[in-house]
Image (spheres, rainbow, N blue to C red):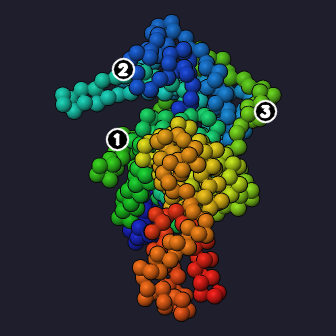
Amino acid sequence: MTDATTGAVTAGTGAYEMVVGLEVHVQLKTVTKAFCSCSTEYGAPPNTNVCPVCLALPGALPVLNAHAVELATRAALALGCTVHPVSVFARKHYFYPDLPKGYQISQFDRPLATGGSLATDEHAVRITRVHLEEDAGKSIHDRYPAATAIDLNRAGVPLIEIVSEPDIRSAAAAGQYLRALKRVMEYTGVSDVNMEEGSLRVDANVSARLRGTEALGTKTEVKNLNSFSNVERALAAEFARQTAVLSAGGRIEQQTMLWDAAHGSVRPARSKEGSHDYRYFPEPDLRPLVVTSAWVDAVRGSLAELPAARAARYASQYGLGAGDIAALIDKPRVADYFEAVAAGHGDAKAAANWVLGEVLAALNATHMDVRAFGIQPAALAGLLGLVRDGTISHAAAKTVFAEMAHSGEPAAVVAQRLGVTQVGDDDALNRWIDEVMAENPAEASRYLAGERKLQGPLVGRIMKKSQGRADPKRVNQLLAVRTGA
């Protein structure tokens, strides 16, 4: 049997397993850039958030953004990494129109942090390193007319690169890892991780090897991945391409591949560089970055509760199922909203059902952040209290909820105005029961004779006659009394 690099003519595609390592670039949530005071604002007119440092004008010198260091350290600690007391910036040389200096300030052999891990649904993925670097500018390619424009607003924006070990074995597992990583970055406040704005970008290294072997195959790097679903699709496509080549006895070339989402395919862009191609050397204009253990401990102490810890607490404190927990903790602000509703109402399961149902549906329909939602947690807790107390029905509560979102009024006021307050008065309920039985004499006679299966349809007609205001629990009790039960 030959190794996975040369392939075996007799091996089918099922004989290979996927090996994936991910490089994730996360834009740090700072007001200014990594090495100058230019704004990091997204969407500004092209080439307006620039200065001599961004433009690499002669004599311009970088000055490190302290807040970027703090955010990078926060991310590293949340991933369980060791933050090193001394790290060194380096120049990474390559030549591209959107890199005016001809090099990128990054970190190489002495990064900020190493050796963490991140748990996913399947297993823990080891984190090789977390290091600081600056972003490049943006090339904008026009087809008609054929031209390329350069916008340097993004040049110098602070990033961290989070590099995983090749521990991922499927496209789905890669998606799980990325979603878990995104949650950690949101919970720590490190980044807004908005892929549409380029705040989180992924490069995927993928190779194929014969199952049961330990040696890694030749890897390719897939770029141009702008969503987690595209990461999964691209990995599946590239793995299929590699296994086809290997099964035919071919050899995989180390290349950078571009993902074409429209056609669901990958294509070669260039031969893949190695670290020696970048001619790294220490950045002479920046001193080594030194952080004290006391400062690192202070940053660690400032970390909010992380997703895994919150999930464990929801299971023990609220007794929620795994599916509800996963959905609630996906967005930290939604999780905060749920906890406030649960505290105000006292029934965590009911709070979870409404947050995951009506609240998320309303937010998704309006593309609204939960902080701007018209129904604050205390107001929703009040609505759920009316349902629990029998003041309004569950069906009526949904109508009240929709009106509350528009008017901002308390649930009790809306329920009263809409006339959906539930009636529990026996005299009123008995009048509705009498009317329904008079309108349906055959069913009423059979029910009173002991055909109990007709109770449900009768209750439904009574609820319809009362326009949903009758207390269904009390209606059932009064009907049962009439049969002598």
Residue 283 in view: yes
Kind of residue at badge 1: Ala
Calculate the distance from the C-alpha at mark 2 to the C-alpha at mark 3: 40 Å
Disc 1 packing (10 Å; few <14; some 14–19; many ≥20): some
From the top left corner, tell me how far across and down residue 443 is, in percent: 45, 86
Kind of residue at badge 2: Pro
Q: Which residue is mark 3?
A: 297
The quarter of the picture where residue 132 lies is top right
Residue 178 in view: no
Q: Is residue 318 left or right of residue 90?
A: right
Residue closest to the eye, 17 or 426: 426
Q: Which residue is mark 2?
A: 46
Residue 435's place in the image compared with 60, above or below, is below
Disc 2 packing (10 Å; few <14; some 14–19; many ≥20): some
Which of pointers 2 and 3 lies earlier in the amino acid sequence?
A: 2
Residue closest to the eye, 480 or 97: 480
Q: Which residue is mark 1?
A: 269
Calculate the distance from the C-alpha at mark 1 to the C-alpha at mark 2: 27 Å
Q: Residue reaching furthest top?
A: 59
Q: Residue reaching furthest left?
A: 145
Callout in the foreground (3, 1): 3
- Which element carries disc 3, helix, strand or loop? helix
From the top left corner, tell me how far across and down residue 263 is, in percent: 28, 51
